[in-house]
Amino acid sequence: MLIPVDKTIWSNCLVFYHKKTTIREIIEIIDSASLQICIIVNKKKQLLGTITDGDIRRALLKGIDLTTSIEKVLNNKPKFFYKKNFKNNYANIINSMQISHLPILNNDKTINNFLIREDLVIYPKKDNYFFIMAGGRGERLLPITKKLPKPLVKIAKKPIIEHIIENAKKHGFRKFIISVNYLASAFKKYFNEKKIKELDIKLEFLEEKEPLGTGGSLGMIKKKISKPIVVSNGDILSNINFTSLINSHIQKKSCATMVVNNYIHEHPFGVVKTKGSKILNIIEKPKNNTKINAGVYVLSPEILNKKYVKDHINMTNIFLSLIKSNKKVNAFPLHESWSDIGNIKDLNQAKKTLNE
């Protein structure tokens, strides 16, 4: 269902068109305005086009650089209604259009109102389970992790794992499973009955008797899982949009979805292209843009069985097994903030970022 958004909110999504505006600048606006869209207007505030969260993610999958002009992602033929034609009895027609955003225009094409799909701004409670893998020893964070498991290390006065839970809660998740092994009692002590009630969630632990790899603990789930399950490493800090992630997984009819992040490696030297002794080209400090595993996944219920989820297995091997079996596996590109707390340097940087 599409619902109207207050002008004080959608007006923050208005961006005056300029061909030098970059995709990165649009991402910042989308993330801050929380409507998953930018409305591009001219100097008279007339609608020129839109750029949605989905447009950005599709561009990232194509390898388009974030410093590129918005012209690469601009939809200059967005669907809209004129106010004079818009009546309440149009609701069924609009909802059948299967769109997430709809500008309502005045006669001069300035924006009068703005409608958005309800679940993009009012996140309903989800029945999906959210599974957090927190069994690792965190050896690269020693000596901090000698007596404290890494997911319980505090950043901005809260454990990493609590940041993950709170972001998932914001998107409607209430059912959580945490797999533990190393210093398992520390998790149970922190997430006592009082804390669980305070967080307003349902939480259970799966305790590995021995390390099972990043995916093996999924095989310990005994309850029936009937909806896609989100799986996250316990040391990831990100404001990822879990609603968009789940929706993408469902819309693409995926068996498994992996969240990926762009990683740019700059070569420290000028690279010389040759053919024999002849120099063909010299590229000064070229940048290699690759996609890396961001440690967050969605799995459909049908693959949570012993064929794919074995006792000792990593998540990457589960995905490789699915690919080999010709199952539908997709990537969900991340444009939100993301940090893998792997070592002391990562931890200090995350603390600096969140405390600013």
Image (cartoon, helix red, strand yellow):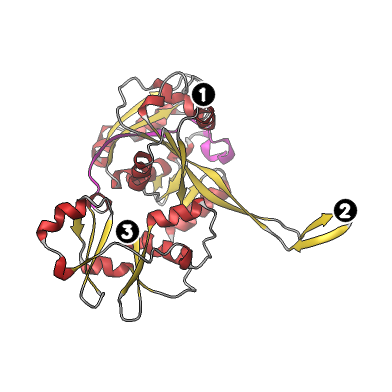
Of badges 3 and 1, the one in the foreground is 3
Q: Residue 324's image quarter?
A: top right
Q: Which residue is mark 1?
A: 211
How would you rate the neighbour count of disc 3 (Cα within 10 Å): few for under 14, some for 14-19, many for 20 or more? some
Numbered disc in front, either 2 or 1: 2
Which region shows up in magenta? Answer: 122-146
Which numbered disc, 2 or 1, marks the residue that appears first in the sequence? 1
What is the x, y in percent for residue 22?
48, 68
Q: Which residue is the site of mark 3?
A: 34
Callout 2: few (<14), some (14-19), or many (20+) C-alpha neighbours within 10 Å? Answer: few
Q: How many marks?
A: 3
Q: Amino acid at mark 2?
A: Gly
- The answer to whether 193 is drawn above or below residue 310 in the figure is below
Q: Answer left or right for 79 relative to 259.
A: left
**In which quadrant of the rendered view does residue 228 lie?**
top left
> Is disc 1 placed on a helix, strand or loop?
loop
User: Which residue is found at the position 21% from the left and 76% from the top?
Assistant: 107
- Callout 3 amino acid: Ser
